[in-house]
Image (cartoon, coloured by chain):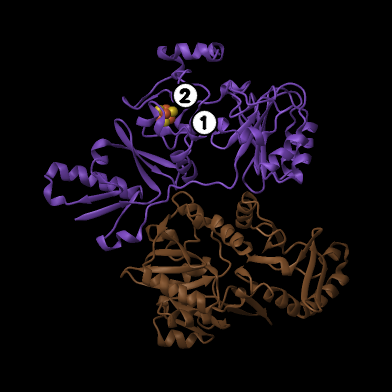
Chain colours: A purple, B brown
Amino acid sequence: MMLLKLFANCILLKGATRAVICDLQRSNYHLIPMSLFDLFDEDMLKLNFNIYNKQQKSILYEYVEFLTANELAFTISQNELELFPKLSLEWDYPSKITNIIIDIKHGKIDLSNIISQIEDLRCYYLQFRFFRPVQMDEIISIGNLLFDSLIHGFEALIPNADTVDEVALTNIVNLFPKLKNLIVYNHPEEKEVCITSDNVGGVFFINSNISSAMHCGVIHPAYFAINIETFTESQHHNSCLNRKISIDVDGEIKNCPSLAKSYGNIKDTKLIDVVNNPEFQKVWHIKKDEITKCKDCEFRHICTDCRAYLENPEDRYSAPLKCGYNPYTCEWEEWSSNPLKKQAIEHYGMQELINL
Amino acid sequence: MEQDSEILIISDESEKSTDQVLKYLLYYDAKFIRINGSDIIEKIEIIFDEKEEIQLVCKDVELNFNKVKSSWYRRGKINLLPVGHYQKMNGDEMQFYGQYLEHYGKELKGILTFIHNSLKSRKQINSIHDNDISKLSQLSLAKSCGLKIPFTIFSNNIENILKQYEPNIFIVKAINFHVFRLNVNNCKWICGANSSELIDNEIDFQKYSGKNILISCFQKYVAKKIEIRTFFLLGKFYSMAIFSQQNEKTKIDFRHYDFERPNRTVPFKLPVVIEKRIERLMRKLKLSSGSLDIIYTLDGEYIFLEVNPIGQFDWLARSCNYPIEKQIAKELIDGIK
Ligand code: SF4
């Protein structure tokens, strides 16, 4: 009998009509038919070729070839089985908040006060999204403020404008090692302006126009996060909102800028009080396994969620509005043209955005 | 938690795993001080009176060693040299300064040893003295603990090795950690081989014939099924299997990394008997923690290669989802309770 065991970081997930092997080490996924999935006993294939006829055998050989050629599985003997434990699916992170989004549209915000609050939260990553033109000086002053803080890294999204100066931006990312990414959106030319010396970030120009928070939440295979961190977090928590906090353009403190519910304004509410509010933490625990449609989807633990725009805005366990995937037919279609979603689109006032 | 007990961490500024452990300490609200090799020690005082006291000031923070209840030596060292003046010197001054440092550094060793020894009676994860453990004593003790080791010769007589053994089954290694290339009177001396040369060495050992060899370590190449990396921490084992044999490029040393198809790295569980032997070895080496290289052979045997007291564990922790940083933080906090 041949024993074929999946590597512990290649994890089998069953959907409604097919299954997928998530290769968490190489950030890949491989779709497989139910007929192959059904042969598995957990992460093992026990193949006794003698009991199969010629035609069945040739299919089995094909499966074995596919699994070994992609290095998804390895042959193993019975007495070695206990040497290869499963990957632990525990997830842990040493802070209550992993990152914060700050949206800026009108005027300036009082950052120095916010930063000390963020430090107290032991939150190490920050994202600024500007929905108005930005002066280069403004980015420099943010960099200066964060320079000696406990913050490990931040990124900024800024719109293309006359004030955007390639050379200045390059100098700025090199000047502030904590500034990981500077992304200029709505730029005619899609390009990588510079990569930082530690290879983890740089200055990027992108075409898409992120003119408001409403652009977020698109579900697409290109955005799948196929890694141990997301996969394990998704087992226990909401893969989009868990341990996140944000301040929207009006200073309202929310789980995500796109969500309607506010827990107070930054003018008179402390971030820590919002974080410790059990009501605020509720969405952290909405798992993919509990969401309509997603719970039957083979991609559920590599696809990050969106709780802001739902197919049924009244139901907190409804699937993301901007997902065009149907796990029952295995087809991707354009979400915005689906007649069943028309009502929800109107509910969120997205008609214009879609017609662009 | 007692107000005035502290955790001391000695590391390098750019050491990422230290950052991770510190995040956990912050998360648990534990009081700690981190000293990096690049930090300037503004003041140091060792007082012998009714009781002994070691006090130092670093980055404006005062530290009394009597209050340190728990320490972690990650790497680097407390730098007692006056590094600050360095930048302003000219060439001659630099040269003089260099010579002075060499001697003064030796003088300081006694003080450093004393400071580090003072941490011994408290909870301690690794120590600067762990760096002094030689590969020879590792091998000798590993054997006495019942672990298998590869056939190994330390020698400067390559002709003899060529004569007596089948040379192409050897890998040439450094005595301890460093590979040397010396140029004396236009004559090249070598000790050990770089890992990038290893593939050649396995096949073409003859190229060392006639060369000037300093004492090097010649170790028999062991055909492996998988490589095992084990992180040991105060009795706990975190092991990972590296399937380097699937990939021709990494057959000798997995450090020849293939970025497109990285070697499979998955959690591994050593048999309890092997763990027991390793634990005994670590006790004999007085190592509270370390990173071990082990080979799992085609015949299912475990061959111990070496233990690195300050080895990296980040790769292992990430690949196998092991909570190593959290565990280190917990152990340190345990010491101040
Ligand atoms: S159905 Fe759910 S899990 Fe599947 S792709 Fe859509 S949003 Fe992701």
Q: Chain of mark 2?
A: A
Ligand 1 - quadrant of the structure image: top left
A139 lies left or right of B151: right
SS for tag 1?
helix
Q: In front here: A267 or A185?
A: A267
- CB under 8 Å between discs 2 and 1: yes
Q: Is mark 1 within 8 Å of ligand 1?
A: no
Residue at x 47%, y 24% (from the top left corner): A316
A113 lies left or right of B202: right
Q: Which mark is residue A283?
A: 1
The x, y position of residue B257, in whole percent, is 49, 57
Question: In this figure, what is the number of numbered marks?
Answer: 2
Q: Chain of mark 1?
A: A
Q: Name above or below for residue B156 compared with residue A346.
A: below
* Amino acid beneath label 1: Val
Asked if one can make out residue B221 in the rendered structure from this viewpoint, the answer is no
The x, y position of residue B184, in whole percent, is 67, 81
Residue at x 56%, y 30% (from the top left corner): A279
Q: Which residue is mark 2?
A: A316
Distance in Å between CA atoms under marks 2 and 1: 9 Å
The x, y position of residue B195, in whole percent, is 52, 67
SS for tag 2?
loop
Q: Name above or below for residue B118 compared with residue A66.
A: below
Please tell me how crowded label 2 is: few (under 14), some (14-19), or many (20+) other residues with Cα within 10 Å.
some
Q: In front here: B40 or B65?
A: B65
